[in-house]
Image (tube, rainbow, N blue to C red):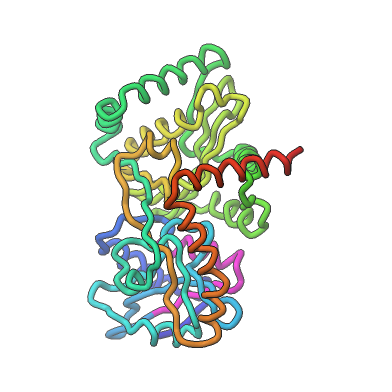
Amino acid sequence: MRVLRPEELGEGEREHWRELRARSAAPRNPFMEPEFTDVVGRVRPRARVAVLHDGGEAAGFLPYERGPLGQGRAIGLGVSDCQGAVLRRDLTPDLHELLRACSLSSFAFDNLEAGQGLFVPCAADEHATYVIDVEKGYEAYEDVLRDRSPKFLKTTLAKERRLGRRAGDVRFVFDERDPAALRTLMEWKSAQYRRTGRRDRFAQEWITRLVARLAETRAPGCTGTLSVLYADGRPVAAHFGLRSATVLACWFPAYDPDFAKYSPGLVLHLRMAEAAAAEGIGLLDMGRGPAEYKDSLKTGEMPVYEGAATRVGAGAALHWLGREPARRAHGFVRDRPRLASLAARTLRSAGRLRQS
């Protein structure tokens, strides 16, 4: 095994990585492609890739970041929506030996991909990630929505028409290249985080730089995609995510609050699903975390896992002290709907106070 910085990977190794993902039964989520790890490495100097060799060729890859006392974390933890190792199917490395070789006392994850047999036994929680299946085309997806929730689809489409009548011609761009539109999206998203009392991800420079670099990434397995809904030439909703040939990973959606009564975010997601299906993309992954709009749009759910693999030592103890109490507290609140509702209201009140 060798441990490299992402930029030190050779093109042959990157191609082996892509081939292993292509042979996997898992969806081709762009967060699991070498291009995502490479861009994270450009903004996160502690990013590394463990390359496992077998029979003279690269047979496995573990992208990660290494912190103090060997505390490791999945690459891009905090923003990456799909995590884990990329291994040849018949390769079964010893977990503790792998951590030792990487000089890691722990390896934390919060969106571990299903089927990651090496790490799933270490998971502390299972979560649902919400998906839209458009494998059979957009019309088939609309039929699913019409059967399950006819009022939702009818109301959303009516709001789209009303937006056009009152605000001007509605236009959708699936892959917008205008940097100004991306800046607008990030401003909306920052305001949303503050308004809801949550941590503003775009206040962290590395995340802003990561998104800007990914917006310029054009690779078959990982392409930064900015989708924008316009009304009379003005952006009213936007989304930035990553796409492969078969999966669109939904990441940062936001809209202009001045147009909230038209539900532009829902309209945007319907148009994204339509455009993705036309491009041959079969799955939109909206990520973990419950939300009303996800419940309205989803066709199904897939499991993802949160937890950490650890080795005995001070670093593992530090990981436990730093993350486990907060994780357990979040789980306690999440599993009690009335308490979760109260917590959400408290966060919104805090956000309003912060803005006043």
Q: 318 or 181: nearer the eye?
A: 318
Task: Please tell me whether residue 49 belongs to the stretch shown in magenta.
Answer: yes
Position of 265 relative to 131 (above/below): above
Q: Could you tell me which quadrant the N terminus lies in?
A: bottom left
* Residue 308 appears left or right of 119: right
Q: Is residue 21 above or below residue 278?
A: below
Q: Is residue 338 left or right of residue 201?
A: left
- Residue lying farthest top? 165
Q: Is residue 225 magenta?
A: no
**Where, quadrant-wise, is the C terminus in this rendering?**
top right
Depicted 101 relative to depicted 110: above or below: below
| Image coords of residue 192 (percent x, y) | 61, 40
- Residue drawn at (42%, 17%), measured in percent from left and top? 158
Q: Position of residue 214 (x, y in %)?
A: 54, 53
Residue at image position (51%, 22%) is 262
Write down the quadrant of residue 236 in the picture.
Answer: top right
Question: Residue 163's spot in the image, x, y percent?
Answer: 52, 18
Q: Which residues are magenta?
A: 32-51
The extreme right residue here reads 356
354 and 172: which one is in front? Answer: 354
Q: Position of residue 160 (x, y in %)?
A: 46, 20
Q: Which of these two is toward me, 232 or 239?
A: 239
Splitting the image into 4 quarters, where does residue 196 fall?
top right
Q: Measuring 33% from the left and 56% from the top, which residue is drawn there?
A: 303
Count of all numbered marks drawn on residues in the image: 0
Identify the residue shown where x is 48% and y is 68%.
Answer: 74
